[in-house]
Image (cartoon, rainbow, N blue to C red):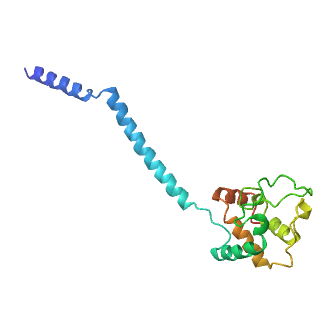
C-alpha cells in the first residue's frame, strides 16, 4: 500500500512538473529575451552618453568664432556654415567653385586643422575657388575660433572620423 501511494505521488509530481506547455515555455523565453534586450539597450544608451565626443575647442572659442564667422565668412558660407548655393560641386559661370558648406555636409572635415588654416590664410584660389586670403585680416586665435564655430555644427560621427584621419594635426 505504501508503495502504491508513493508511486502515485511520484507520477503526480512528474505530471505537474511537466505540465508546462511548449507555448508557455516559449512565452517565458520571449519575456526573458525582451527583458535582456531592454537592459542591453539602456546599457548601450548609457555607454553612448559616457563616450560623448570630446572636442578640441571650448564654448568660449565657439562664441568668439560665431562673431568672427558672422563678420568674415557667413556671406559666402552661410550664417550657420551650411552654404548658400544648392550644389557647391557645380562650377560657377566663371569656372570657379562656389564656397562649400563647412557644417560637415561637404568636404571640410576631410582636412586637418593645418590645411583649414592654410586655406583661411591663403584663400581658395589654389583650389579653384574665389575665397580671399585672411592672413592679415584675422589673428591666429580668431582663425581657430572660426574653425571651432563651424566644427560645432559637425555631428559626433563626422568629428570622430575627422580626428581618426588626423584632423587635429
**Residue sticking out furthest to the front:** 93
Q: Nearer the viewer, residue 58 or 91?
A: 91
Indicate the position of residue 11 as horizontal and vertical percent values: 19, 23
- Quarter of the picture containing the N terminus is top left
Q: Quadrant of residue 152?
A: bottom right
Q: Quadrant of residue 28?
A: top left
- Quarter of the picture containing the C terminus is bottom right
Q: Quadrant of residue 107?
A: bottom right
**Residue sticking out furthest to the left:** 1
Residue at (88, 61) in percent of width and height: 129
Residue at (74, 66) in percent of width and height: 168
Q: Decide: is 69 above or below 25.
A: below
Residue 113 relative to residue 55: left or right: right
Residue 13 relative to residue 24: left or right: left
Total number of numbered discs in the rendering: 0
Q: Decide: is 151 above or below 47.
A: below
Q: Decide: is 151 above or below 23.
A: below
Indicate the position of residue 8 as horizontal and vertical percent values: 14, 22
Q: Nearer the viewer, residue 88 or 54?
A: 88
Residue at (81, 69) in percent of width and height: 117
Amino acid at each position: 500500500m505504501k508503495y502504491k501511494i508513493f508511486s502515485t505521488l511520484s507520477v503526480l509530481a512528474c505530471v505537474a512538473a511537466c505540465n508546462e506547455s511548449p507555448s508557455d515555455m516559449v512565452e517565458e523565453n520571449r519575456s526573458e529575451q525582451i527583458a535582456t534586450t531592454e537592459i542591453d539597450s539602456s546599457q548601450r544608451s548609457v555607454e553612448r552618453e559616457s563616450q560623448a565626443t570630446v572636442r578640441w575647442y571650448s564654448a568660449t572659442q565657439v562664441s568668439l568664432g560665431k562673431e568672427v564667422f558672422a563678420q568674415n565668412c557667413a556671406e559666402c558660407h552661410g550664417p550657420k556654415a551650411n552654404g548658400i548655393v544648392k550644389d557647391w560641386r557645380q562650377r560657377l559661370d566663371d569656372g570657379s567653385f562656389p564656397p562649400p558648406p563647412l557644417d560637415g555636409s561637404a568636404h571640410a572635415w576631410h582636412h586637418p586643422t593645418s590645411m583649414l588654416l592654410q586655406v583661411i590664410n591663403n584663400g581658395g584660389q589654389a583650389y579653384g575657388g574665389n575665397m580671399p586670403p585672411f592672413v592679415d585680416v584675422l589673428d591666429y586665435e580668431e582663425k581657430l575660433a572660426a574653425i571651432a564655430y563651424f566644427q560645432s555644427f559637425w555631428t559626433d560621427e563626422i568629428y570622430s572620423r575627422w580626428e581618426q584621419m588626423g584632423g587635429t594635426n
